[in-house]
Image (cartoon, grey):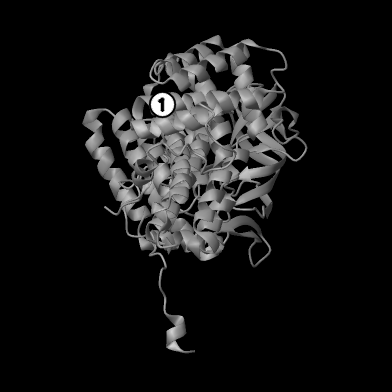
Amino acid sequence: MAATTHTVSNQVPPLVGYDVFAADRALTEAVERHLAPERLAGVREELHDLGRAAGSAQVQEWGTQANENPPKLRTHDRYGHRIDEVEFHPSWHRLLGHAVGAGLTDAWGRPGGHVRRAAGFLVWTQAEGGHGCPLSMTHAAVPALRTDPELAAEWEPRLTSPVYERGLRPAAQKAGVLFGMGMTEKQGGTDVRSNTTRAEPLSADGEYLLTGHKWFCSAPMSDGFLVLAQAPGGLTCFLLPRVLPDGTRNVFAIQRLKDKLGNRSNASGEVEFDGTWARRVGEEGRGVRTIIEMVAATRLDCVTGSAALMRQAVAQAVHHCTYRSAFGGVLIEKPLMRNVLADLALESEAATVLALRLAAAYDAGSEAEAAFLRIAVPTAKYWVTKRCTPMVGEALECLGGNGYVEESGMPRLLREAPLNSIWEGSGNVQALDVLRALQREPQALNAFLQEVGRARGADHRLDGAIKDMLTELADLNGIEARARRLVERMALVLQGSLLVRWAPPEVADAFCASRLGGDWGAAFGTLPHSLDLASIVERARPVAH
């Protein structure tokens, strides 16, 4: 081949060797906003270390390798003994080990722990989203276990440990453990009250034997699981260890691993219980109430994980357009491309600001903030996760044909994007959960309205959207059929109120004009041309630090 035909020009350098945290101005400002000044310096240093690692060539390669080498199920050893183990590529263990070491399973016992962890989760999972599942489940198991002080005292130090120890051994012999969760069954899906797994009590108090199946069991390689089963007193929550204290394997037959659209590096399995030993968590018949705080915490991680995908997609799109030339200039200076990039940046920043506000509410620990979370978490989970897929798809298009090629990393982001909208209850489940809170917990609505009301009077479009939302809330006619419409409006009002209070004026103005004022088309890139789009795009640009 003639050398003259293989000259490479006008190709974009890889986005590598940068601090993922420092390059995200919306995130760094949120961390400064929500953390006490005396803790800020230490947390900022931790996040910068994590951000530099996430943006390094080595960690990006780990993410690629983990995604290209999915886990494998080994049901038996060479002699025919049932072992039910999941094998992962070494890069998966490196990613997970670094995350655990960075404290991404430890939020509940330290001041400002949820903001710190949410920011770290948002930074680190940009390198690879799949291993976020065991991090999320392990972190979220803590509040459920705290309903039983004895179990919490035994297991919480292991769950929050910064030590990652792979392999199945008795939990007492490990410096740190991971947890998964099993609620979904093939006949019921989200309707967990139709579960058929049985729990037969033993003579020892709180001990049971479980028999049944789980259609989706998250992170089946974990050391322990929180599961739901039907005890004599009704649906109940249980702690199921993989290895019993005497070193024998608990009965935990992994029938197969799911072949998923995305999330390829992570294992999700179908499992069978047959006389499987477990400890009761909470009271019999109160399984949903016991595990609901775990569900809420994982829902927040769905929001944060979607914000991470959005941010990485925007970073890649803006980076590409900064260097790529077409029609006589770089793409980022073209008015139409600038409109697209600014629109994507707005979606990303709104998701980040909302995720960190929810994390700060967890840290506050007050009754008012708990009431706010009751509505705000399913509202955010509904909207942010649902916006992720079209937003990532549009970002991919900014790279043109290069974005459609696996080497760009954009197809992996796009395959991952729908996941968080499905996990822990899909869109309809979230919308119905918001309706239940509205109907049964008036203090939750009051807390939500107080939050959005803090920005009242600052922008006439936000004020109008709040008024319209209140009108919808007052009308109960056909409320279930229009639940999605209502929750979408609530999410946009909440995001708008946060941006009006905290974002730069050009960001808040563009969000209110488009999302709340109606000056917006049906696709990204349809913002009013009179806005300061250049400043919005520049704010989103991932500059190396």
Q: Amino acid at mark 1?
A: Leu
Q: Which residue is mark 1?
A: 498
Left or right of 283: which side holds 193? right
Residue 322 spot, x, y in % from top left: 37, 56
Instruction: Please give the name of the residue rendered at 36% of the width and 55% of the height, measured from the top-left corner.
Output: 55
Instruction: Please give the name of the residue rendered at 68% of the width and 50% of the height, measured from the top-left corner.
Output: 253
In front of the other: 349 or 286: 349
Q: Residue furthest bottom?
A: 2
- How many other residues sit within 10 Å of disc 1, few (<14), some (14-19) or many (≥20)? many
Q: Is residue 345 above or below residue 455?
A: below
In front of the other: 119 or 323: 323
Left or right of 202: which side holds 506? left
Q: Which element carries disc 1, helix, strand or loop? A: helix
Splitting the image into 4 quarters, where does residue 241 fall? top right
Q: Is residue 132 above or below residue 494?
A: below
Splitting the image into 4 quarters, where does residue 505 fall? top left
Residue 418 spot, x, y in % from top left: 60, 45
Q: Is residue 453 above or below residue 544?
A: above
